[in-house]
Image (tube, grey):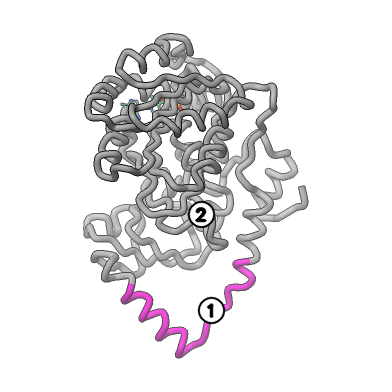
């Protein structure tokens, strides 16, 4: 939820932890001996199987809400308070420790985590004449906006792809419903963000399923002159549910197929007084994004026809320990085995 509070570009940033987190972030939590959790709640999408989460770690847990302390993982040190006051005090305490006992020896650990980051990055393939990959759209958006946008998301694969592949460098630039899992969140939340931060670029990355839950709010955006951008990752499926049915229910697909053509999102956008654009090929992504970003007088909807079978990886299967992290089809069996042993092999 706090992507951007600590910039993704910092060498010490390992990325998002959890069910679809980066290998480096997930495994660093499993292997470390101390976690300082600031305003985090150890929910199941981060911890995986709770009893197997971060088995070697002592926990310092600071949160403004006393109900969060010990709710899931019992802390070794509990701090209740606003981080505005807690953090400076922690820094002073840390300095005192360092002055007395000297700096902790972290060189080996940092080399290890950097090795994991290099060996097991987020990986996907975009063939120039193959189906359009959602990750590619996010990466191009990230590059073209230099991280200078407020990114809002719905719930599902598109949300995970957005969080994984957008380079967040500023606080409060990633708005989504997190653990609440609120499909339909993106358009209204983008509307609110645009009202709160007029003049800034607000981009909703939404799924075709989510979008159809609250698309009518485009009318409000048009009437109120809010130039939000809505990028629909139209894979024709409730993609995240499809992925679970593929991986865990032997491809018995049920109630997940939406089709890409109905409704016609370009016409729908136009009916709501918005600009409507479509993009079907990787080679057109830059031009279509450029066009969308240049429209500032009305809301803009882009129908990105994305690959219908693309999955989100890495993945920790629900209920499993984070140690069971699966790197996904872009990695070889040898790489997956080395990763399970925490080894770094040259790829
Ligand atoms: C109101 C609601 N219903 C069901 C779910 C369960 N759910 C989580 S993701 C998802 C599919 C989302 O599909 P889509 O918006 O097309 O996004 P995609 O996963 O394809 O990117 C569903 C049904 C939910 N989180 N909220």
* Cα–Cα span, label 1 and label 2: 24 Å
Q: Nearer the viewer, residue 104 or 174?
A: 174
Please provide percent x and percent y for residue 249: 51, 22
- Using the rendered view, name the quadrant where residue 333 is placed: top right
Please provide percent x and percent y for residue 123: 64, 40
Mark 2 — residue? 8
In the rendered view, tell whether residue 304 sits above or below residue 333: above
How many residues crowd mark 1 within 10 Å: few (<14), some (14–19), many (20+)? few
Please provide percent x and percent y for residue 209: 39, 21
Q: Secondary structure at mark 1?
A: loop
In the rendered view, tell whether residue 78 sits above or below residue 234: below
Q: Secondary structure at mark 2?
A: loop
Mark 1 — residue? 104
Magenta stretch: includes residue 91: yes
The residue that appears at 58% across and 53% down in the rendered structure is: 24
Tell me which segment is drawn in magenta.
88-110
Cβ atoms under marks 1 and 2 closer than 8 Å: no
């Amino acid at each position: 939820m706090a992507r951007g509070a600590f910039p993704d570009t910092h060498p010490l940033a390992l990325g998002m932890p959890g069910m679809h987190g980066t290998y480096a972030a997930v495994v660093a939590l499993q292997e470390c001996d101390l976690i300082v959790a600031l305003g985090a709640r150890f929910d199941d999408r981060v911890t995986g199987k709770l009893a197997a989460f971060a088995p070697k770690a002592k926990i310092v847990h600071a949160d403004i809400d006393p109900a969060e302390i010990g709710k899931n993982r019992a802390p070794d040190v509990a701090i209740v308070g606003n981080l505005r006051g807690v953090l400076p005090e922690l820094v002073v305490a840390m300095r005192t420790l360092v002055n007395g006992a000297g700096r902790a020896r972290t060189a080996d650990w940092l080399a290890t985590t950097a090795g994991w980051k290099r060996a097991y990055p987020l990986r996907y393939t975009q063939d120039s004449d193959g189906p359009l990959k959602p990750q590619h759209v996010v990466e191009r958006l990230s590059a073209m906006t230099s991280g200078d946008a407020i990114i809002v998301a719905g719930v599902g694969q598109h949300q995970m792809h957005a969080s994984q592949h957008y380079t967040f460098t500023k606080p409060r630039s990633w708005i989504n419903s997190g653990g609440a899992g609120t499909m339909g969140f993106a358009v209204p939340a983008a509307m609110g963000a645009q009202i709160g931060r007029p003049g800034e670029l607000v981009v909703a990355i939404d799924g075709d399923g989510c979008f159809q839950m609250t698309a009518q709010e485009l009318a409000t955006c048009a009437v109120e002159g809010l130039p939000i951008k809505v990028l629909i990752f139209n894979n024709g499926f409730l993609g995240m549910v499809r992925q679970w049915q593929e991986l865990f229910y032997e491809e018995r697909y049920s109630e997940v197929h939406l089709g890409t053509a109905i409704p016609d999102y370009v016409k729908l956008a136009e009916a709501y007084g918005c600009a409507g654009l479509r993009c079907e090929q990787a080679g057109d992504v830059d031009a279509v994004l450029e066009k969308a970003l240049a429209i500032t007088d009305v809301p803009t909807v882009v129908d990105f026809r994305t690959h219908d079978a693309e999955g989100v990886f890495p993945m920790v299967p629900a209920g499993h320990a984070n140690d069971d992290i699966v790197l996904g089809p872009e990695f070889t069996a040898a790489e997956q085995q080395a990763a399970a042993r925490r080894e770094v092999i040259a790829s």
